[in-house]
Amino acid sequence: MSNEQSSDVSIREVLIKGKEYFHYLKKRWFWIPIFMIPFLAYTAWEYVNHSVQYQASLSFMINEEDSGGIGAISQVLGQFGGMIGGSKGYNYEKILELAKSRKIVERVLFDTIEMNNESDFLANHFLDMYVNEDFYGKNRFDELKDFRFKRGDISSFQETEKSVLKTIHSKIIGNANTSTKDRLLTVNYSDKTGIMKLYFQSNAQDMSVHFLNKEFENLSEFYIEKMTEKQQETFDVFKNKVDSVKFELAQTEYALANLKDSNRKIYLKQDLLRQDQLQRKIQMNYVILAEVVKNKELADYTLKNTTPFIQAIDLPMTPLKPIKYKLIQSAVASAFVGGVFFVLFFGLKKFLKDLMI
């Protein structure tokens, strides 16, 4: 019984205290706009300095059906040093991470695109669009504000070129502290549909569309190349072996024909011995050639059936709908934050005042 009374007293005290704080804040309502002004001013500054963004999107999927005969063929070819790998399916997370990798983005940045009647590396158009003090930092802005790439051979870049390239890549994909809406390139994947999507936003429609198209093209080529690397090596080994055996067979047949022509049906025993040796070598080469050709065909079949088929679903195209600044929503959010600071400030002030009484 005493516990129930104590609970009732506690609730009553909380309600009384809450009412007391409410009236305390109510008497100071005129401070609310003062607390809101800084946040609303920041929203107004963002609105004035906001540049229109254009977001392009591209969706694609990977055919992950494996041929039922691949396992058996892999076992047949497994005797050749294990150069054929077993099918393990397609790693969707891997391809989405590759899309953000510097290796893929670099290929896109050094593709040539025409913008504003000027043909140049996409990386240089990007610098024209985004270079400011925040991009490089105040300490480096004066030094790098006029920097432009003169060549696309990344392997020969000097330190300055590498530094600027890394800065561009960081701007495009963001970092751990970058919100999703502030990242220029974003990727996602649906577990239900298996469809992957790429998004890119910039200040120009042409850049957004071109970047995504080249991103998809380079991503597809690189992914297919790496996923079929072992199978391609195996096919190349057998192809080279077929060519080698054919060449040796042709040489031997020519040697036998030359021997017969030179003797004009007059044969010494040593000539007959040489002729028998060449005929046996020809027969052996035919047997080897048949086996190697069969293995080459198996390797070719495996290569074709393990090559992932990346199918674009919706490619980006102009015109793109501009992403406008959400002024009303931002203003409401700023006003709310200002109100929260008002409550916290005066609530804490009263709390400390009550402690001192």
Image (cartoon, grey):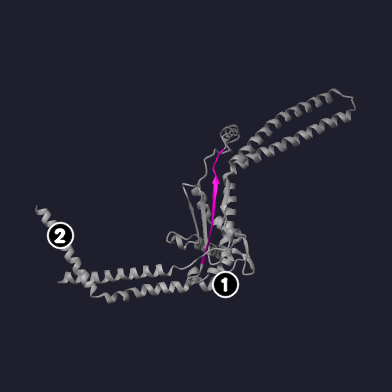
Residue 192 in view (yes/no): yes
In the image, residue 214 sits, relative to residue 53, either above or below, namely above
Secondary element at image label 1: loop
Residue 304: % across, % down: 62, 41
| Residue in front for this viewpoint, 142 or 179 | 179
In this rendering, would 98 be left or right of 38?
right
- Mark 1, Cα crowd under 10 Å, few <14 / some 14-19 / many 20+, is few
Q: Main secondary structure of the magenta part?
A: strand
Quadrant, the C terminus: bottom left
> Dots 1 and 2: beta carbons under 8 Å?
no
Secondary element at image label 2: helix
Residue 160: % across, % down: 55, 66
| Residue in front for this viewpoint, 22 or 260 | 22
**Residue under label 1:** 146
Q: Amino acid at mark 2?
A: Ser
**Residue under label 2:** 10
Residue 351 in view (yes/no): no
Point out the tag, 1 or 2, that comes first from the N-terminus: 2
In the image, residue 310 sits, relative to residue 280, either above or below, namely below
In this rendering, would 354 be left or right of 187?
left
Residue 188: % across, % down: 48, 53
Is 283 covered by the magenta stretch?
Answer: no
Q: Which residues are magenta?
A: 53-66
Q: Residue 356 sits in which quadrant?
A: bottom left
Q: Amino acid at mark 1?
A: Asp
Residue 179: % across, % down: 43, 61
